[in-house]
Image: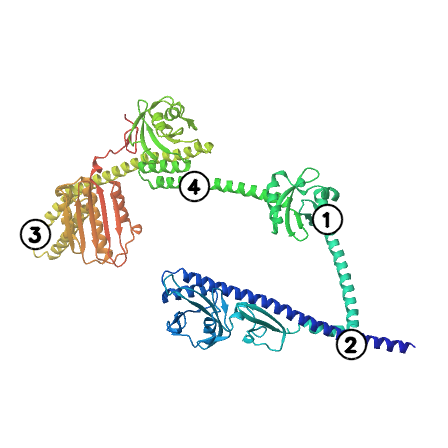
Amino acid sequence: MSGSLGAVALALVVLLSAGGYLLMSAAIRGDRRAAARRSANADSDRAQALLQRASAYVAGLSQLLAKEAAPGQQRFAFLAETTSASFGLVDALWIQAHSGSLVARYATTLSPGSDVSSFRTLVSPIVGRTVVFGVNATRLGSLSGQAGFYLLQSGRFGNRPGSSGYLAVFVPRGWMTLSLGADPRQLAVRLDGQPLEGRLRGPPAATVGFQALGQSWQVAVPLAAPTDLQATLPWIALSWPIVAAILVLVVSSAIARRRRAERAVERIFDLSLDMLCIAGYDGFFKNVNPAFAQTLGYSSEELLTKPFFEFVHPDDHQRTRQVYEALLHGRDVSRFENRYIRRDGSECWLEWNVRPGPGERVMYGAARDVTERRRSEEQVRQAQAALKASRDQLRRLADEQAALRRVATLVARGVSPTEVFDAVTSEMRGLLRAQTTSLLRYGRHSTATVLASDADQGMKFEIGKRFEVQDDSVSALVKRTGRSTGIIELSEASGETGRLLRELGQRYAAGAPIVVEGELWGVIGASWGQQPHRSADVEGRMTQFTGLVATAIANADSRVEIAASRARVVAAADETRRRIERDLHDGTQQRLVSLLVALRAANATIPPELGDLKRELAETERGLTSAVAELQEISRGIHPAILSKGGLRAALGALVRRARVPVDLAITIPERLPQAIEVAAYYFVSEGLTNASKHADASLVHVAVSSNESAVEILVSDDGVGGAEPTKGSGLTGLRDRVEALGGTVQIVSDRGQGTSLRATVPLDFAERPQRPSQGSVAGWSDTP
């Protein structure tokens, strides 16, 4: 029995499967034929609309021709091509009757004047007078070997007599399918029963006819190929029980997966540490997860029953509303931060990523509490600001130390006090950002003299200008108290300096004393148009510069003392040399010469038979002569007598004659120079010649001594081996000391293989300078009013 039921069930399944296959196949064929009919109707409507557009084009071109003043081939071609370019038609003719024939008077393809009487398709409507004012289509014909049809309309070309004619526009085969964007294998068009265009791959499944432009038209379409679904559905119907079972299994599985996914999403939503929410376009939360409620301290009911703008910090309402508007327009929002107010009143920074769902009119948002991060960022910003302030302070200190180092370098190099004063006023003005800085020297009778000033153009005080020290001026306050003034206002200050500063737009000033060896020497002052930002630093910085100025002044005094002392030592040594030379010449040398003369006389009286004694006396005579010569050489080395008697010119001449190498001597000086300068020049040349003969291996030495109004210049150069090192010998060092003691300078150039050049410059006014500065005078600045 069960076997029979199984067979019946199997037979029923087979019957149902076969019936389903046949029914489905028939239904699909019916659908395909219905689709072909719909396609044919649609293509027919599109073809009629296309023909109407072509008719409107021809009518429009006819109206343009009628408005022309006079016909012409060029004008016709221009109008036809201009209007047809946008419609895909390029062939047009203007036909007129002439001598019993029809002539294409104007044309875009044929030659103007061509006889078209033989164009039966074209001329039959004209001869039959079927074309009057409306646009008609001809039957299938050709133009220049190409198949197609014509659109005809009678009209006028110009307004002169004989302007009547016919406008013909040729429509080539394929124009309709191309204009319709159709596949020629899927669409066929017949004109008046003749095939016009299209090549169907099979018999037509649907044909639609219509009347247009005086002709009958037919549009045919084939049966469309079955789609993949249509080809598959019969087989699905054949196996529908299995498919049904499979569908049941798939649907049930999908439903189960969807339920599992929904439960997983719900678990993620509830367990996520991030704040998740769904908000509506109406401004209310639709759902929030527990993390959202826990972070803000509200219950879910409170969050869902109030507009979410009530929870936003008032200062962030405008920014949040702008983002809300962007979401309503469908734009995603990422990493947007705003503040929410917790239930306890505290602020909470949230970072949002929100995506709108326009179809559901909701927004899906995920937020993260970034309050601690914002606090950390604020702390970092504060630390960066403090670091920047520290860097600025360090930069100011570095600038200050650099300025002090530059001035201290000048002081250590021993430059003139004037250079130090100028550098101090310039550097101090830059550090203090002052408009003017000045250095003044106190004098007698309550005066102060400007020694240096730095300011913008037109704001400097004149160097050497003397001011009266007023009771309420900066210089007066410093002189009276001996201390720095700090920053004071100039609005009430009287006197010349206060008036001048106010005229220059200065409103604030400060001063610091310059104390030299315990005595108040002068004052450094600075002024500003606006009150300085860091007034506490001004006094300390000015004091540091005043210390350098005091050191420079003290050093200047010391250098003057040292120079005078060196000059006195050199002068005393030269005087000692001259005295020794005189003593040797007048005493010892003369006695030796007397002894030598007596010895020669005694030797002359000895008889020849005492030959041994005579030879011993002769040997003694030669030794005594040599000793006299050596004594004379020593005497000249100590101090040449000829220098004192004949001057530098004669002394150098004698020195050159005794030299061991050839010497080229050039002297252009007055008859006599100051004695100290002559001695220095003599020994300078002597040492140069000695070095050239002993060490330079020179073949020629050039010696030049010249003078001008201010200085004497001595040059000794040779063509020897060079490479002299002044620091390793005492001779050149002693020459440098002698010349510098006279206020001069020495330059030594001795490149190896290029000879040696010694150049000395000695000021002529050294002998006139005071050997010690007068009391109260520092660096050439007198305090005498």
Name the side, left or right, on which 567 lies relative to 524: left
Distance from Cα at disc 4 to Cα at disc 1: 60 Å
Badge 4 amino acid: Asp
Name the side, left or right, on which 374 lies relative to 27: left
- Label 4 neighbour load within 10 Å: few <14, some 14-19, many 20+: some
Badge 3 amino acid: Ala
Where does label 2 land, which residue? 18
Precedes in sequence: disc 4 or disc 2: 2
Precedes in sequence: disc 3 or disc 4: 4
Q: Quadrant of the C terminus?
A: top left
Q: How many marks?
A: 4
Q: Which mark is residue 289?
A: 1
Q: Which mark is residue 604?
A: 3
Q: Nearer the viewer, residue 323 or 527?
A: 323
- Would you place residue 773 above or below residue 347 in this image? above
Badge 1 amino acid: Asn
Secondary element at image label 3:
helix
Mark closer to the observer (2, 3): 2
- Would you place residue 423 above or below residue 96 in this image? above
Precedes in sequence: disc 1 or disc 2: 2
User: Decide: marks 4, 2 in contact (CB < 8 A)?
Assistant: no
Regarding residue 559, the answer to whether it shows in the image is: yes
Distance from Cα at disc 2 to Cα at disc 3: 177 Å
Where does label 4 land, which residue? 399
